[in-house]
Image: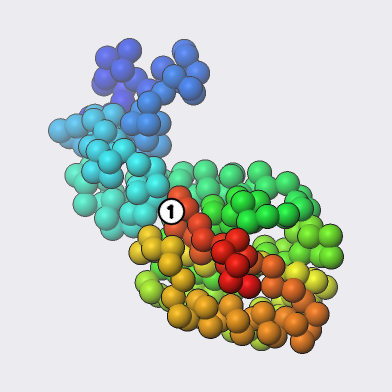
Amino acid sequence: MTIKFLAKDDRPREKFLRNGKNSLSDSELLAIIMGSGSRDESALELARKILASVDNSWHQLSLLSNKELMKFKGVGEVKAVSIIAALEIGKRRITQEIPDKAVISNSDEAYVILKNQLTDLRTEEFWAIFLNQRNKVIQVSQLTQGGISQSIVDVRVLFKTALDHLSTGIIIAHNHPSGSLKPSKEDINITKKIKEAGQTLSIQLLDHIIITQDKYFSFSDEGLL
């Protein structure tokens, strides 16, 4: 059953054209992305079922793989890829809203830049923000992508990148897919190692941030640097 078989007032595309994008519910937006449902359900009904399975959370939906999405009757490979692609576009759009050459003066501002890279992941990743002497952002880079419990960064690669960009300061960050904000022994050890290496090269480690879905932990704020 495709959207065209719905009653006119229930067609998401027509509602979009008639009342604008803000009039659409989450399920209506998802129905438009999918375009059609199954033999037994309209696209809108299928969208409601999919969203209900993740507690109506776009974040939780973004964690589903194409295979997991294809478990829903009526969702084939094309629809699954379309859903994932649409969510990725939204993520990238937010990332592009970061002002060019933003100045970072505290952990909140660093978190704003990094959270969209690190909140929707099932495995750990290690990122770094490279700054000039005025704390303006020069580069934001992913350095490693690891397993479920850890992502080890090569300190040499970190500082090579810093030197390549003539950075005088760096902020490092990684995510905890488990949701725990407590630094592990490995987190503390790598922070100490990076800080000491930076002192040798006159590149200051300004902060190490641990990010979960909606919170963060700052080594600097907690007096651990």
The relative height of residue 217 versus residue 144 in the rendered view (above or below) is above
The quadrant in which the C terminus is found is: bottom right
Q: Residue at x 53, y 83 (%)?
A: 189
Residue where numbered disc 1 is placed? 213
In this view, the residue in front, 117 or 203, is 203
- Please provide percent x and percent y for residue 199: 75, 82
Residue at (79% x, 57% y) in the render: 136
Q: Is residue 30 above or below residue 72?
A: above
One can see residue 38 in this view:
yes
From the image, which quarter does the N terminus lie in? Answer: top left
Image coordinates for residue 185, horizontal then vertical, percent? 45, 80
> What residue is drawn where x is 39% and y is 42%?
58
Of all residues shown, which one is farthest toward the left? 40
Q: Is residue 208 visible?
A: no
Reply above or below: 47 against 166. above
Classify residue 36 by image quadrant. Answer: top left
